[in-house]
């Protein structure tokens, strides 16, 4: 059974960092194979994981829709597209990555979103986990790219705007009647304690954070030096916070894997 984990929130809240540390946790604990989906047009999940994404879904679709496309004789358009999309997968040990990238033209997001949803549905059964780093805001949720979610991680930074974005995403999930087994709010980049004004806003919005990730100078240094966050030590404050969160969320799943 595949467990689908989706990460969503306002831009700049550290969604990709959280996604990277979730994937780090899954692989370090040897919980199975992982399909990572970078569904943000501003793609940088590969760098955080120490991988190189040579091809993207958006680029393939741009070429596919271009006037100079040459489809081999005897091959249908659909079969050729499926073949090309397979080249967007970056493979490594127990971890594969598919990068959406940025499309062009008036339908640059809707069509890639539809294609990537079909790809995930088709390939997800081959993996123990699918982790999707979503586009900033609510675009993928509103277009139903992210469906049948086991764990929805709603990431806010230490700001009122971030919390309000989380509240809007939470409301959108209900409005669209998406299948989400569990939602967890993550308060990220917290400098020391939570500001009293943010506590007031959380009370007003009915938000209780499942996890608080402190501002981590070590993570910031890795980012500045362009080192993969996957290589952060276990002593990193952010790593420890995400590990604690995932221990709680996946405790039953880990027990089943160990018994198996």
Image: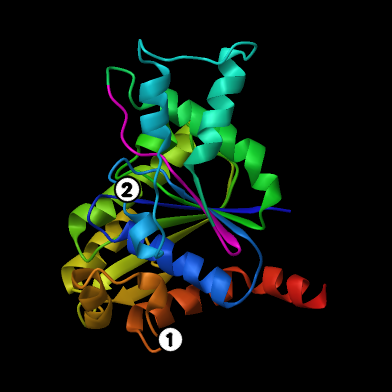
| 2 or 1: mark nearer the eye | 2
Q: Is residue 101 above or below residue 181?
A: above
Q: Residue at x 35, y 69 (%)?
A: 228
Segment colored magenta: 92-104
**SS label for mark 1:** loop
Q: Residue at x 42, y 29 (%)?
A: 60
Residue 89 is left or right of residue 32, and the answer is: left
Residue on which the image places disc 2: 43
Q: Is residue 233 above or below residue 189?
A: below
> How far is disc 2 from disc 1 in space, using C-alphas?
25 Å
Q: Residue at x 66, y 65 (%)?
A: 32
Rendered location of residue 1, percent (x, y):
74, 53
For label 1, the crowd category at 10 Å Cα-Cα, with few meaning under 14, some 14 to 19 and many 20 or more, is: few
Do the residues bearing badges 2 and 1 touch, measured as CB atoms within 8 Å? Answer: no
Q: Which dot marks residue 234?
A: 1
Rendered location of residue 161, percent (x, y):
19, 53
């Amino acid at each position: 059974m595949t467990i689908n984990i989706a990460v969503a929130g306002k831009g700049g809240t550290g969604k990709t960092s959280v996604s990277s540390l979730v994937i780090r946790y899954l692989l370090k604990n040897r919980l199975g194979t992982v399909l990572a989906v970078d569904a943000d047009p501003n793609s940088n999940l590969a760098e955080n994981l120490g991988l190189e994404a040579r091809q993207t879904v958006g680029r393939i679709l741009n070429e596919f829709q271009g006037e100079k496309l040459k489809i081999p004789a005897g091959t249908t358009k659909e079969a050729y597209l499926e073949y090309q999309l397979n080249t967007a997968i970056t493979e490594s040990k127990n971890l594969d990555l598919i990068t959406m990238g940025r499309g062009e033209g008036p339908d640059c997001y809707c069509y890639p979103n539809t294609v990537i949803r079909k790809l995930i549905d088709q390939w997800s059964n081959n993996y123990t986990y699918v982790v999707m780093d979503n586009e900033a805001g609510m675009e993928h949720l509103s277009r139903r790219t992210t469906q049948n979610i086991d764990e929805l991680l709603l990431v806010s930074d230490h700001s009122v705007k971030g919390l309000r974005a989380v509240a809007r995403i939470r409301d959108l999930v209900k409005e669209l009647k998406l299948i989400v087994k569990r939602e967890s709010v993550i308060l990220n980049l917290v400098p020391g304690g939570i500001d009293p004004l943010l506590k007031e806003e959380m009370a007003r919005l009915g938000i209780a954070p499942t996890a608080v990730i402190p501002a981590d100078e070590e993570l910031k240094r890795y980012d500045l030096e362009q080192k993969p966050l996957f290589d952060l030590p276990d002593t990193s404050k952010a790593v420890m916070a995400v590990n604690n969160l995932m221990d709680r969320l996946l405790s039953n799943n880990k027990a089943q894997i160990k018994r198996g």
